[in-house]
Image (cartoon, rainbow, N blue to C red):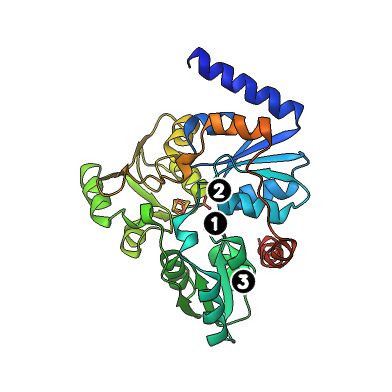
Amino acid sequence: MTVAEKTLIDEINELREKKNAVILAHYYQRGEIQDIADFIGDSLELARRAQETDADIIVFAGVRFMAETAKILNPEKKVLHPNPESGCPMADMATYEGVKKLKEEHPDAAVVAYVNTNADVKTLADVIVTSRNAVKVVKALEEDKIIFVPDQFLGGFIAQQVPEKEFILWKGFCPPHFNLSPDQLLELKEKYPDAKIAVHPECNTKTTEIADFVGSTSQIIEFATTCDAENVIIGTEVGLKHQLEKINPNKNYIFPVNADYCGTVHCCDMKKNTLDKIKEVLENETNEIVLPEEIIEKARKPLDRMLQIV
Ligand code: 13P
Ligand code: SF4
């Protein structure tokens, strides 16, 4: 670590203490952000932490829908987003008007929204899910017909696990995960025949079908660091490498090279947050997440419902 980096971290720590702030970070954040976070987790774990914290300020190092979710679940807190440019392209694929129309066309269906949606779309949902709890939540619903937005691949994965229900899938997708091809994984498997394959359910269907394990970012970390294979092929964003190597450095974690998209499975938006930006928002209390009260109230219901189920 350089002297400048150490000074920056000292400044962040001083501000965090003085302002009673907590820094929450997703696993796809840069390693140096993960290292200074008070808590790192998958979307569900981060939402719970945000809801439970007694800090006055939450600095949310993740993409915008995650920071919005923190605000909806704990509206009394000041939620600061280090870089307002850090959005989720998949969340932006589902529009309020489009989802409203689909809901009107299928009044007997339950609207299940992935947490990767913008706050206005959440207001139309009957329940929210994350990659960790989606199958369990959908199974628990009374309705036999499900509108799932926006990820067609997570939706397709749930539909495979819950064949007794009918699914109408929004055609959104996560660009980094979509571009991870099953051929890349199979090539790696040929090179490391004893390896296990763990992937995120946002990957395309052919990819999830050849995996030994499909789960959320936290679940992938748990599987990869504890399974009996020495080599584990990881089908998700490369940010996970940092924690995997910290938690169990005795294994070989293999990330597919993806020539089509930033060289690896890489979420450019997640990487827009930096230590400099974290210091800046803590110091000046800028980039606050502000949502209309009506949106907070309406979006909170499906989020609360999810948290009651799991
Ligand atoms: P997790 O809930 O698994 O952390 O996933 C969040 C996400 O955006 C994956 O692309
Ligand atoms: Fe969105 Fe995909 Fe990035 Fe996750 S990895 S934040 S789904 S673009």
How far apart, in angstroms, are the residues tagged by discs 2 and 3?
Answer: 21 Å
Q: Which residue position holds label 2?
A: 42
x then y, percent, for residue 66? 59, 51
Does the numbered disc 1 mark a residue whose Cβ is under 8 Å from ligand 1? Answer: yes
What residue lies at 37% left-to-right and 41% top-to-bottom? 229
**Secondary-structure class at tag 3:** loop
Question: Is residue 163 among the parts visible in the rendering?
Answer: no
x then y, percent, for residue 283? 67, 30
Work out whether residue 137 or residue 257 is closer to the camera in this orientation and state it. 257
x then y, percent, for residue 48? 68, 50
Question: Is residue 76 among the parts visible in the rendering?
Answer: yes
- The answer to whether the residues at label 2 and label 3 have Cβ atoms under 8 Å apart is no
Of the two numbered discs 2 and 3 on the same chain, state the one appearing first in sequence: 2
Three-letter code, disc 1: Arg
Between tags 1 and 2, which lies in front? 2
Q: Which residue position holds label 1?
A: 132
What residue lies at 40% left-to-right and 52% top-to-bottom? 199
Three-letter code, disc 2: Asp
Of the two numbered discs 3 and 1 on the same chain, state the one appearing first in sequence: 3
What residue lies at 74% left-to-right and 43% top-to-bottom? 53
| Image position of 275 (left or right of 51) | left
**Secondary-structure class at tag 2:** loop
